[in-house]
Image: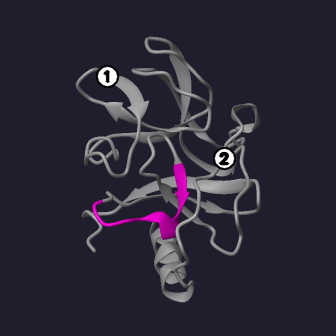
Amino acid sequence: MKKLLALVSLAALVMPLTAPAADVTVTAANVIPGPNADLITGVAGATITAGQIVYLDSTSNTWKLADADASAVTSGSGGALGLAAGGAAAGQSFVVVLSDDNLTVGGTLVMTAPIYVLSGTAGGIAPLADLAAGDYPVVLLIARSSTKAVFKPLRGPVVVSS
């Protein structure tokens, strides 16, 4: 975790911030956890698609779509945060990736801006440049290639200010 934090800090210093870009477009059928992925089974509290970012709602003990700009709870602060490895309707079981050093994301990642964060769109993965005032910052992944990434959610301590 210390290495990941150091890498994120270094990347933030040396990489210029660019204009906001679109969230990663994920093809659910192409999301593939790596062989060393930390996986658990959970119950969906909403309709979830493979590749979406989810948080554990401690009130209902179900997984729901994470959202960087809705609240501290929906950004996963104080609870588990993961990536759906499969889809589910509310009440169904599905597999959640808690961390993975070789995740096939199911979308195209940009190597010139390899840090991705929790999006302000529920369940989405956004480029670092998309962090905005009022967001609860969560670094989700760092690209290893245009299709693979290290997935280890790292929550920021505060809301992004302007």
**How many angstroms separate mark 1 from mark 2 (CA)?**
28 Å
Where disc 2 sits, the SS reads loop
Instruction: Give the residue type that dot 2 points to.
Output: Thr
Instruction: Give the residue type that dot 1 points to.
Output: Asn
What residue is rendered at 50% in x and 73% in y?
Answer: 8
Please identify the quarter of the rendering in which residue 56 is found.
top left
Give the magenta part as a residue range.
Answer: 125-134
Provide the residue designation for mark 1.
Answer: 61
Is 60 above or below relative to 67? above
Residue 44 locus on image (x, y percent) = 45, 20
Is 141 above or below relative to 10? above
Please identify the quarter of the rendering in which residue 162 is found.
bottom left
What residue is rendered at 30% in x and 45% in y?
Answer: 70
Magenta stretch holds residue 133:
yes
Decide which of tag 1 and tag 2 comes sooner along the chain.
2
Q: Nearer the viewer, residue 134 or 11?
A: 134
